[in-house]
Image (cartoon, grey):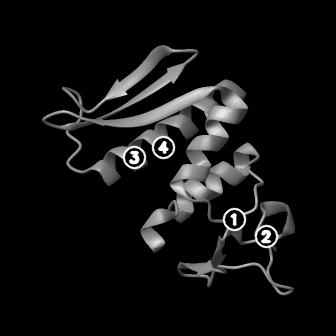
């Protein structure tokens, strides 16, 4: 189940970009490492794990689906993984391809690797716009 959630470094980058959606999980720091805490289900004790509600050193842990949806809704950036005889990812804006990786420039061996690389590139694109 934990592979459905984006890694800590990317979750932290999304927090810095303004991601503040309710999540089923959060990343907590124990000084040396980061631990994913999942809180499935809604009850009186459930926290929505939005970044604004978490203490310093913690950040929400969105799923890949949430992260990609956030980029679509907030920046009109569409990231997707395609499978040919190799894995590639493509990023488009208003139907125009602005990035494609995996064919000649970098070999991506699995769908999950392509998905993570696509997410990293989306983060990088937004950081560049904000500078």
Mark toward the start of the polypeptide (3 vs 2): 2
Tag shown at residue 23: 1
Please state, as top left, top right, bottom left or bottom right, where the C terminus lies in the image.
top right
Give the percent coordinates (x, y) of residue 50.
78, 63
Write the residue at 44% across / 16% down: 97
Q: CA distance from mark 1 to mark 2?
A: 6 Å
Mark toward the start of the polypeptide (4 vs 1): 1
Give the percent coordinates (x, y) of residue 92.
49, 22
Which label sits in the foreground, 2 or 4?
A: 2
> Which quarter of the picture shows residue 82?
top left
Whether residue 131 can be seen here:
no
Q: CA distance from mark 2 to mark 4?
A: 24 Å
Q: CA distance from mark 3 to mark 1?
A: 19 Å
Seen in the image, is 65 located left or right of residue 48? left
Tag shown at residue 115: 3
Mark 1–mark 2 CB contact (< 8 Å): yes
Seen in the image, is 2 located left or right of residue 23? left
Label 4: state its secondary structure: helix
Near mark 1 (Cα within 10 A), the count class, few <14, some 14-19 or many ≥20, is many
Write the residue at 69% across / 79% down: 41
On the image, numbered disc 2 is attached to which residue? 48
On the image, numbered disc 4 is attached to which residue? 120
Mark toward the start of the polypeptide (3 vs 4): 3
Mark toward the start of the polypeptide (2 vs 4): 2
Label 2: state its secondary structure: loop
């Amino acid at each position: 189940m934990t592979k459905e959630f984006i890694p800590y470094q990317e979750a932290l980058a999304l927090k810095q970009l303004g991601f503040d959606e309710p999540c089923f999980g959060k990343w907590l720091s124990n000084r040396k490492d980061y631990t994913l805490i999942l809180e499935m289900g809604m009850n009186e004790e459930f926290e929505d794990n939005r970044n604004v509600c978490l203490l310093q050193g913690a950040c929400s842990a969105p799923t890949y689906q949430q992260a990609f949806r956030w980029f679509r809704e907030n920046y009109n950036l569409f990231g997707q993984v395609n499978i040919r005889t190799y894995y590639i990812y493509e990023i488009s804006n208003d139907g125009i391809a602005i990035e494609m990786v995996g064919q000649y420039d970098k070999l991506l061996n699995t769908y999950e690797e392509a998905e993570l690389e696509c997410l990293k590139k989306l983060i990088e694109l937004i950081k560049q716009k904000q500078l």
